[in-house]
Image: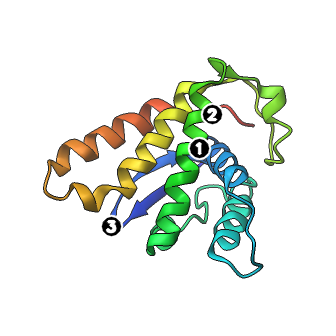
Amino acid sequence: MGTSYIEVNEQGFWMRDSILELWMRLVALHIEEPTEDDSQTRRIRDQWLIASRGYFNGCIPIDLNDDVSTEKGKQIIIDTINSVLNGLRQAPEALNKDVLNLLGITGAFIQDIETWRLIEVGEAFLDLIDWEDCRDGDEHELHARMRRKTEQAHGDQALT
């Protein structure tokens, strides 16, 4: 399983594809149903659904920088991540591999996924999106925090 780089405004982190694909699939499924065919909401949701399919080993096509480049896009992503995080915080300690295999991701999960790993990923995404708002703070601490979260979230390879 490969790794992909997630970035916004030249700041970012590397993630294992299996966890990233699962995270993106959960986020895409939480995006509100778009009311217009050509809406930004539909574009983001469709892009994340395709990117989370499992076809892009080592180069998952997520353009988070573009997705959050407008206030509307940023709000869509932030609201949706918070929706997923709220659900995960109420979820069991581990998400059953057999249920995860129903999500339409290529490959098969061979072990349950600890919920805290996905919570760490969501928090790292929010930190990255809010990077610009933290410019006056300690950038090195923010970067170190994102790195710790994504490294912890990796764990063992969970997808074959």
Identified at 60% across, 66% down, the residue is 61
The residue tagged with tag 3: helix, strand or loop?
A: loop
Q: Which residue is mark 2?
A: 87
Q: Quadrant of residue 115?
A: top right
Q: Position of residue 103 (x, y in %)?
A: 81, 43
Q: Is residue 100 above or below residue 63?
A: above
Q: Give the quarter of the figure containing the N terminus.
A: top right
Question: Please, which residue is most extreme toward the top here?
Answer: 93
Q: Which residue is mark 3?
A: 10
Q: Position of residue 46 (x, y in %)?
A: 73, 67
Q: Is residue 143 above or below residue 136?
A: above
Q: Nearer the viewer, mark 2 or mark 3?
A: 2
The CA distance from mark 2 to mark 1 is 6 Å
The CA distance from mark 1 to mark 3 is 26 Å
The kind of residue tagged 2 is Gly
The residue tagged with tag 1: helix, strand or loop?
A: helix
Mark identifier at residue 83 = 1
Give the mark nearest the N terminus, 1 or 3.
3
Identified at 44% across, 71% down, the residue is 71
Identified at 53% across, 30% down, the residue is 117
User: Is there CB contact under 8 Å for labels 2 and 1?
Assistant: yes
Q: Give the quarter of the figure containing the C terminus.
A: top right
Side of 137 relative to 13 (left or right): left
Disc 2: CA contacts within 10 A as few (<14), some (14-19) or many (>=20): few
Q: Nearer the viewer, mark 1 or mark 3?
A: 1
Side of 116 relative to 13 (left or right): right
The kind of residue tagged 1 is Ser
